[in-house]
Amino acid sequence: AQSVTQPDIHITVSEGASLELRCNYSYGATPYLFWYVQSPGQGLQLLLKYFSGDTLVQGIKGFEAEFKRSQSSFNLRKPSVHWSDAAEYFCAVGAGDTGRRALTFGSGTRLQVQP
Amino acid sequence: SQTIHQWPATLVQPVGSPLSLECTVEGTSNPNLYWYRQAAGRGLQLLFYSVGIGQISSEVPQNLSASRPQDRQFILSSKKLLLSDSGFYLCAWSVTDRPHFGNGTRLTVT
């Protein structure tokens, strides 16, 4: 079965600084990979996804992520963080056949942005 | 366009009371439907998924059940809530792409 590890539970960065959130996955084949953001009390918003092709994926709000098969990683990056980026971020791996496509989520990384 | 509705947004229920959370999807046919739960300080855990009317698969043993009485309706239920059922419940749908999430229901069992 697939699994996702987000080793950083909580990260604090200064506004304007760069950001990298780590995600490692375990899956026997090429996975579908996702990053979601969750603001307090809200549902999940998709930031970006990787299905195939170019391993550097651009998402919304200036985020990008790079799929590295050799490292089983899909780290999320942003060159300059804004205060509005403070939220919880979830990495997820999708697997299974077409009839299912359920996601397995990591435990999340809470991002705090200092002024 | 497709939309997903999930209600209520918040719910406070006493231990031992029943539960019914409803989720409906508009603008698509025969979607896969999912219920996820997010416990405090934890990630999301898949509870149930459904590939069609009356077809429910449970991912984890628990105090909850799910039903799909119509193609675009997915209901999460419990006969008697436990304290441990507290959490944030998210409904989602998918067809050929990634799951699309509702805004969630925050359930507090007191």
Image: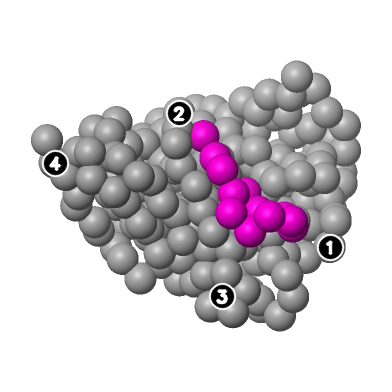
Name the residue that disc number 4 marks: A114
Q: Secondary structure at mark 4?
A: strand
Callout in the foreground (1, 4): 4
Query: Which amino acid does the dot numbered 1 rest on?
Result: Asp
Q: Residue at x 45, y 54 (%)?
A: A76
Residue A60 is at least partly visible in this image: yes
- Residue type marked 3: Ser
Q: Same chain, marks 4 and 3?
A: yes
Depth check, mark 3 against mark 1: the one in front is 3
Whether residue A13 sits left or right of residue B56 in the image: it is: left
Q: What residue is rendered at 36% in x and 36% in y?
A: A39
**Compared with residue B8, is residue B98 higher up or lower down, i.e. above or below?**
below
Chain at tag 3: A
Q: Is residue A53 magenta?
A: yes
Q: Nearer the viewer, mark 2 or mark 1?
A: 1
State which chain disc 1 sits on. A
Q: Residue at x 46, y 42 (%)?
A: A63
Secondary structure type for disc 2:
loop
Disc 2 versus disc 1: distance between alpha carbons? Answer: 31 Å
Residue B21: where, in percent of width, then height?
57, 37
Instruction: Tell me which label, 3 or 1, sits earlier in the chain.
Output: 3
Mark 4–mark 3 Cα distance, whole angstroms, equals 31 Å
State the residue position of label 1: A97
Q: Earlier in the sequence, mark 1 or mark 4?
A: 1
Q: Label 4 neighbourhood size at 10 Å, few (<14), some (14-19), many (20+)?
A: some
